[in-house]
Image (tube, helix red, strand yellow):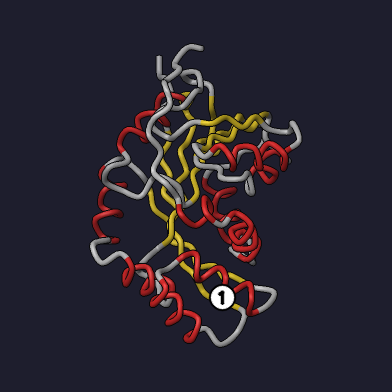
Amino acid sequence: MRGFRRPDKAIPSPNIWNWPEVYERENRAQDAEGAIWTALRETAPWSGSDVLDVGCGDGFHLPVFAAEAASVTGVEPHAGLVERARERMGGRATVRRAGAAALPIADASIDLVHARTAYFFGPGCEPGLAEAQRVLRPGGAIAIVDLDATVAPYGDWMRADLPRYRSDRVEEFFERHGFSMRRIMTTWGFPDRETLEAVLRIEFSRAVAERAIAATTGLALPVGYRLHVRRKEAFRP
């Protein structure tokens, strides 16, 4: 295939790689009001488009794209999650095992590259950005959804576990690479305390998770995200 790259070395994602069943429950709890999907539709609509979901995990977001897109492809480096995604989609999407820096996708064949809390975390993701640019058609967009560590309380817990993480540097990185940024406030809504506690325990170290559990008295948790979007310049004769 034109533009094919050999698989790159994947960076492990401990939460979904180690606890896919708990992460499924987390995905169901996230963005309870659909604020992220609303922002995506407004900024990078995909109806009738060819969509690529990078780091698709077990394919949780693929059905939303498949309901409107012309075609949907998911890319995921973890073999077990690839199989789960294929089972979920039942042929309604193509799911391939690969990493963000080595996409098995032809040049200029995709209208929207979507990545949600996967790989694109700022400095160091340049190879993946280059691959996204390669596979995009002129006028296509890359949309990166990431957690906003400036928003309490979830952001406070993130920074406690990642003391070297600097939100300002990440935002400066994407701005320097030509991305717009939109902040999105969402709510994670859990059906019960068991689910809430299980999710927090796969997202944080033991000490931080226990702190987060103690601080969360109900079943809803406000969480901030950032949406970074960049379009590939269309050809002008």
Q: In this view, does 20 lie above or below 107?
A: below
Q: Toward the viewer: 142 or 19?
A: 19
Residue shown at the point (56%, 75%) measured from the top left: 197
Q: Toward the viewer: 122 or 111?
A: 122
Image-based side of 57 in relation to 92, left or right: left
Image-based side of 110 in relation to 61, left or right: left
Residue type at the position of mark 1:
Glu
Quarter placement of the C terminus: top left
Residue shown at the point (51%, 12%) measured from the top left: 1
Residue 181 place in picture, x, y as percent: 39, 53
Residue 192 lies in quadrant: bottom right
Residue shown at the point (30%, 64%) measured from the top left: 162
- Badge 1 crowding class, 10 Å Cα cut-off, few under 14, some 14 to 19, many 20 or more, is some
Q: Is residue 11 above or below residue 131?
A: below
Q: How many labels does the image show?
A: 1
Residue 85 place in picture, x, y as percent: 65, 41
In the current view of this chain or complex, which residue is farthest to the right? 90
Residue 118 place in picture, x, y as percent: 45, 47
Q: Toward the viewer: 206 or 53?
A: 206
Image-based side of 71 in relation to 229, left or right: right
Q: Mark 1 points at which residue?
A: 197
Residue shown at the point (65%, 29%) measured from the top left: 94
SS for callout 1:
helix
Residue 169 place in picture, x, y as percent: 24, 56
Q: Toward the viewer: 235 or 225?
A: 225
Residue 68 lies in quadrant: top right
Q: Is residue 17 above or below residue 107?
A: below
